[in-house]
Image (spheres, grey):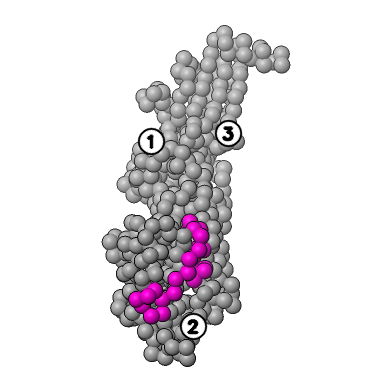
Amino acid sequence: MTEKSPVRLSIVIPVFNSPQHVRTAVASAAAQTCEDGDVEVIVVDDGSTDETPTVLDELAAEYRGVRVIRQENSGWAGAPRNTGLAAARGDYVFFHDVDDRLNGDCLGNAVAYADEKLSDVVLVRLEGRGGRHTHDDVFADTQEVGDIRRLVRSNFCFKLFRRSFLVANDLTFPAERIRLEDAQFCFRAYALAGKVSILSDRTYYFVCDHGDGHISQSRTEPRLHAEGIRESLRPLESGPWEDALRREAVADFFRRVTLNRFNDTFHTRRVEVRLAWIAESTRLVREFCLPERLFEFYSPLNRARVWSLASGIPALVEAVARRGNRSRAVLNVVDRVQVRGFAVVVEGTAAAVLATREITGLDIQVRKDGEELALFGAELTGERAGGGDVDRAANAVTGFRVTIPVKALLSQGTVKLYARATDDEGRTTGFIRIGLAESARVRRRHWGVSIESSPTKYGGMNLHVRTGAKALLGQVLGRRR
């Protein structure tokens, strides 16, 4: 590098305790050239505690144009990337992870393309190695003005950015510990850029398996991941795109980072982890998916996931997750429990999801210790307890009412309710646990009979009927209070 030559390209590589990868990464970056200027490689050591600093000193001496910046450990990739960006002098910046590599001397071609097309951001063709998935459909062909539906499918930061554009818009990575930091950075850039292009004439960058040495490769709690999703979605709530295309792009991203989690392996996770993911995803569905009507772009399975998450009842979420596309399903939520005479009247909402198009019949099953005690036909009232966008995420929604005689519950203690439905073609679904809305909890004593409805840990409905002297005594004492 000469003092008189302009720096056309800065390649930023964050590193932490990765001596086994950093030599390949730096060699890959140092091999880049630009016809009309120089290339600099900025390696930011995020407080490595092994032999990485020694290796970096050797690399800086070996390769012209390599600078090493050392800082205290931040614990995440965002801070060292920001450090490298602040130190960059090139017209363009490319972010390179320590365990990936470029495909020969290629970025000079991307710089020339950005110059010619006046692009602020250029997505160069990526290729996954070692099981990494890079969405090949994004790079089906070159697009001078990238389709937002493709752009959102590529949320890696391994792209070419015009540095003056980043500086003018104060675009930096989140420095705190959060997931999807790449998506947050890229989606903000997409929304603000004058032009975002896709360059697919060759493979530019290999995204390799991040098994070790990758700063962001660690598990985070659901709350942090959900916050990353939320911050990624905010730049996409508006922008320079046609609204229908924008919503379709957002729906695709939301499906990949939120809904796909609830698959047939979800139940294998620890209970507390599952409950946390369901709670966070319920908030995301209510905050983004329902107002934006993202479910309009979804398959029946993902519409079912939306409906179950919108209910906020874990039992229903797991019911959908376990079934996947294998069977029809009707989800049921009890909205109201009353005691009339010597009967328990249960009212709720039945939502047809997956393949079922219309509900023509509904049976309510009473179970004790997994065994059926009684089966009752429910009346379909047609009234919709939820309404609005929640209902529209299902194929069909109807209210239901079932009357359960107290005598059918005597001496049984706590029982659980399940339901199965019949559609307009006479097909019957399997039994699925009924959920209980928080507002439907009830405790009632009526002439020696104590009746209580309460949710299980997963939001399923428990119905408890107690009779005899204890129940009557409890009623008398309750009245005296």
Query: Which image quarter holds the N terminus?
Result: bottom left
Residue 203: x and y in percent read: 31, 76
Residue 147: x and y in percent read: 44, 74
3 vs 2, front mark: 2
Say which quarter of the image contains residue 169: bottom right
Residue identifier under label 3: 440
Q: Residue furthest right?
A: 481
Residue 446 in view, yes or no: yes
User: Mark 3 and 2 residues: CB-CB less than 8 Å, in contact?
Assistant: no
Q: Amino acid at mark 1?
A: Phe
Residue 309 is marked as none
For marks 1 and 3, the one nearer the N-term is 1
Residue 349: x and y in percent read: 51, 40
For marks 3 and 2, the one nearer the N-term is 2
The secondary element bearing badge 1 is classed as loop
* Residue ID at (57%, 43%): 385
Give whichever of 279, 328 is nearer the camera: 279
* Residue ID at (46%, 38%): 272
User: Mark 1 and 2 residues: CB-CB less than 8 Å, in contact?
Assistant: no
Residue 372: x and y in percent read: 38, 25
The secondary element bearing badge 3 is classed as helix
Residues in magenta, as a range: 60-84
Q: Amino acid at mark 2?
A: Asp
Residue 139 in view, yes or no: no
Question: How many angstroms separate mark 1 from mark 2 (CA)?
Answer: 62 Å
| Up/down of 62 relative to 181, above or below | below
